[in-house]
Amino acid sequence: MRKQLILITVIITLFSAAKGQDKTIDGIAAVVGESIILKSEVESQYLQFRMQGNFRNSDRTKCDILKNLVTQKILLRQARDVDSLKVTDQQIEANLNQRMRYFINQMGSEQKLESYFNKKIPAIKEELRGKIEEQMLVQKEQQKITKNINITPSEVRDFYKSIPPDSIPKIETQYVIGEIVKEPPISAKELQKTRERLKELKQRIEEGKSFSTLAVLYSQDEETAKNGGELGFYSRGELNPKFAAVAYNLEEGEVSDIVRDKDGFHLIQLIERRGELINVRHILLKPEPSTENIQQAQSKLDSISTLIRKNEIAFSEAAKKFSDSPNAINGGIMINPKTNNKLFKASDLDPNVGYAVKNMREGEISDPIPTTTEDGKKAYRIIYLKEKKEPHKASIEKDYNTIKEWAQQQKKSKKLRNWLSEKMDETYIRVNEPYKDCNISKNIKNAVEQFNQRRAR
């Protein structure tokens, strides 16, 4: 229940910032150049802070929140008016979809989220779209300011030496893990069955049935099905080549023949063309492997794991030879998408993988584990625990890359802090009651740190 309350407060914070409220009734906390910050924005973020169990001095906290909001306004103005940075509709849509999946997962269901806000998911997304675009532009500007920050080995060592011995962070358990994935083959019978189902749907469309209605009812692309199969505007390069080759040759309103790509089988209808961009809707059907095929994949992995355990083949060689995972090229070693390196904390792992490695020793291979690939296909995989780093105080010898990341982030924060200080001297800033004592134009450090923490989350 507490998690849901925090989530609701987070969403309300976004809505408060997104809505064009009556400024006379709401009240203006601060003016930054030609932009304003409403008191409700400060108060809603403070409420979120409290809901997370923080009870620090309220005036000081609200000042830090206001500093953070001023920081974002300055970065947003630089991104839009000076550097002319852009984010595409597709990038915004992907961000919104990711947030919706998180919100729905935390609330328990799509219906519960819609019921609480008395809005359908598309309406919630539309209301948040402008705020999400602003947040993405702010992140893009921050990346632009700090993009050329590099760090030398001597700077890493100096950074580590500057940490008081009793303040050296503790590194939690970390894992280096390999995987070999086998996707069950799809039988010719199942492929033909899927084609026949799509042929029937196309015939119904030709007889006058609504493409979008059939997409809602039958498409297995969950993200687009609820919008009648509509993808939104994409360029050719952003679409799967096979899909794009057909979609770009359609006339508006025309429905394609059956198209097969890595995701499955599609029917495509062109809605609109704007220069090099097209908006289409589609119906996706995914052929499913039979129970027998799934068992074949499991048996194949059993055989491979036996060979590895008998030292008849090295894990890395087996991964390159047999695995259906993109990690096969790395000898099966998994890359952590959060850090782009090989180390995983327990919290970074898929629960099934975390459970598997918890009691494994270095060098051990798991039994086959059911999994789902990135494109939603059923598969099996075996896990190899290559290395397990027990909890310890960070050291240059064991944790150089982690310490390098800390040092580089500190250097980036300093660069951003200096940049913001210069911009604050050039920007008109007026702070109204009850925040006049916040001293916004000085001590920008807290605002930068808060900004970085929010971006990391």
Image (cartoon, grey):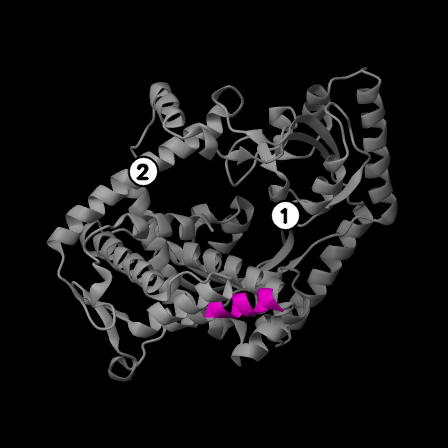
Q: Is residue 17 above or below residue 428?
A: below
Front tag of 2 and 1 = 2
In the picture of the structure, the residue carrying the numbered disc 1 is 375
Number of other residues with Cα within 10 Å of mark 1, as a class: few under 14, some 14 to 19, many 20 or more: few
Q: Residue lying farthest top?
A: 312
Left or right: 35, with 131 as reference point: left
| First in sequence: mark 2 vs mark 1 | 1
Magenta stretch contains residue 50: no
Q: Residue lying farthest bottom?
A: 25
Image location (x, y in percent) of residue 99: 51, 60
Left or right: 250, with 147 as reference point: right
Main SS, magenta residues: helix
Image location (x, y in percent) of residue 216: 62, 70
Magenta stretch, residue numbers:
1-11
Q: Residue at x 42, y 58 (%)?
A: 92
Q: Residue at x 79, y 51 (%)?
A: 190
Snapshot quadrant of residue 20: bottom left
Magenta stretch contains residue 10: yes
Q: Residue at x 53, y 66 (%)?
A: 6
- Residue type, numbered disc 2: Lys
Snapshot quadrant of residue 197: bottom right
From the viewer's side, name the closer residue of 318 and 236.
318
Q: Is residue 13 above or below residue 177?
A: below
Total of numbered circles in the picture?
2
In the picture of the structure, the residue carrying the numbered disc 2 is 412
Q: Residue at x 54, y 34 (%)?
A: 170
